Image (cartoon, rainbow, N blue to C red):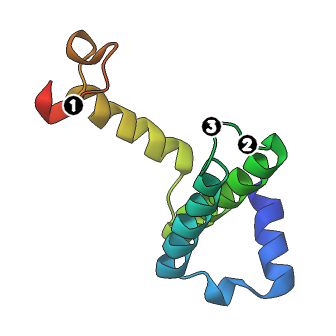
Amino acid sequence: MMDRLKEFVAERDWAQYHTPENLAKSISIEAAELLECYQWSNSASLEHVRDELADVLTYCFLLAENLGVEPAQLILEKLEKTAIKYPIEKARGTSTKYDQL
């Protein structure tokens, strides 16, 4: 998938625009468009949601590539940190923020 994504970007000479700052902005913009799918209803067109989610993920993967980090490793490392903040015995079944558990 990353090879195809990098090829797509290279074919269009877009890498010059893919600074970490621009990619982070694009993630936020696309995430807002994903949220917009649910703006006035708790249901949304699955096709539209899939398209917007793909845009968010695309920019996330491009940012990870730009920073030289592996997305799967980032997630695993973050899960370890989050497990400490949200121990099972305190967090199970609640959405309370970690500092109020």
From the top left corner, tell me how far across and down residue 43 is, in percent: 69, 37
From the top left corner, tell me how far across and down residue 65 is, in percent: 59, 65
Q: Secondary structure at mark 3?
A: loop
Indicate which label's residue lies in the foreground, 1 or 3: 3
Q: Left or right: where does residue 87 sit relative to residue 78? A: left
Q: Left or right: where does residue 49 sit relative to residue 91? A: right
Relative vertical location of residue 94 with respect to residue 7 in this rendering, above or below: above
From the top left corner, tell me how far across and down residue 9 is, in percent: 78, 76
Mark 3 sits on what residue?
Answer: 42
Report the residue at 51% width, 65% height from top: 68
Report the residue at 78% width, 64% height from top: 5
Label 1, residues with CA under 10 Å away: few <14, some 14-19, many ≥20: some
Residue sitting nearer the eye, 38 or 92:
38
Label 2, residues with CA under 10 Å away: few <14, some 14-19, many ≥20: some
Report the residue at 57% width, 69% height from top: 29
Q: Give the Cα distance between marks 1 and 3.
A: 30 Å
Relative vertical location of residue 53 with respect to residue 79 in this rendering, above or below: below
Q: Amino acid at mark 3?
A: Asn
Report the residue at 63% width, 62% height from top: 33
Q: Secondary structure at mark 1?
A: helix
- Say the numbered circle drawn on residue 85: 1
Label 3, residues with CA under 10 Å away: few <14, some 14-19, many ≥20: few
Q: Amino acid at mark 1?
A: Lys
Q: Earlier in the sequence, mark 1 or mark 2?
A: 2
Indicate which label's residue lies in the foreground, 1 or 2: 2
Q: Earlier in the sequence, mark 1 or mark 3?
A: 3
Mark 2 sits on what residue?
Answer: 44
Q: Amino acid at mark 2?
A: Ala
